Amino acid sequence: CAVPPRAESLTVRSPSHLLLRFESNGSHRHRLVTLPDSIRQPARAQLRAELRQARRDIPPPARARIARRVALIAERVRLARAIGYRSAGTVEFLVDDATREFFFLEVNTRLQVEHPVTELVTGEDLVLRQLIVAAGEPLGLSQSQVAFRGHAIECRINAEDPERGFLPAPGTISSFHQPGGPGVRVDAGMATGFEVSPFYDPMIAKIVAHGRERDEARRRLREALANTVILG
């Protein structure tokens, strides 16, 4: 597939240099992109809005974060258009936190396992939106209609043995008690009596908590994990 020249040159020029560099001061960014024909203009509108916000009288650290977000949005849209991509997908970057440079990593042509976090902070059903686009229908949503509310944190619950280096631990689940409460979401493909197969990913469930502030989301997640019981 064709990729933007910027992404290609930054990724290919020195893989060993990138690995060493990001081992110490790097971070990993996922950016969702949904590109039917109808999303191109809303994406550009979001860029313009965020650029206007970046020019306002706000603290320099926040202004820098907005500028980097604007650049990431521009790159993901440019990449998707370059390859004629029409679906939901996730563009991944490596970001140098010291210099604010970012480097293209890969595109996952699907939703990420962390998509419940986005759904909780936006209130949007991303799976439904993906199916709408796949059916050739208009997305039915503009970027200006997407509002971010609060914070969300996700934990993956895996059937693994910590005493054996977290190797998969297949077998029968004898008891599975899921947590609940305000702001708590559980996505599970297992229940009491189900078999954890040795042939697939050992993930049992995802537990996600949402709160008005990050600390509230963190407290809710800690309580949800404390109330989760999985035996087998």
Image (cartoon, rainbow, N blue to C red):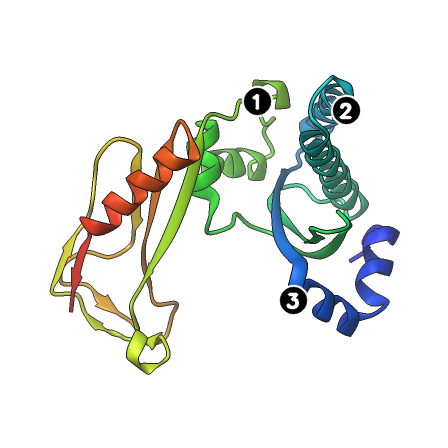
Quadrant of the drawing holding the N terminus: bottom right
Task: Report the residue at 74% width, 27% height from top.
Answer: 47
Does 157 sit left or right of 72 as displayed?
left
Binning the other alpha carbons within 10 Å of mark 1 as few (below 14), some (14 to 19) or many (20 upward) gives few
Identify the residue position indicated by label 1 in the image: 140
Does 231 sit left or right of 21 as displayed?
left
> Percent x, y for residue 95?
70, 52
The answer, for residue 203, to whether it is visible in the render is yes
Task: Report the residue at 46% width, 31% height from top.
Answer: 121
Q: From mark 3 to mark 2, how far is it between C-alphas?
A: 31 Å
> Percent x, y for residue 11?
79, 62
Task: Report the residue at 39% width, 36% height from top.
Answer: 215
The answer, for residue 108, to whether it is visible in the render is no
Q: Mark number for residue 23?
A: 3
| 140 is higher (above) or lower (below) than 154 | above
Out of 93 and 8, give the one closest to the viewer: 93
First in residue order: circle 1 vs circle 3: 3
First in residue order: circle 3 vs circle 2: 3
Circle nearer the viewer, 2 or 1:
2
Mark 1 in CB contact with mark 3 (< 8 angstroms): no
Residue type, numbered disc 3: Glu
Quadrant of the drawing holding the C terminus: bottom left
| 183 is higher (above) or lower (below) than 174 | above
Identify the residue position indicated by label 2 in the image: 51
Instruction: Check disc 1 and report its element: helix, strand or loop.
Output: loop
> Percent x, y for residue 73?
71, 37
Question: Which quarter of the picture shows residue 78?
Answer: top right
Binning the other alpha carbons within 10 Å of mark 3 as few (below 14), some (14 to 19) or many (20 upward) gives few
Binning the other alpha carbons within 10 Å of mark 2 as few (below 14), some (14 to 19) or many (20 upward) gives some
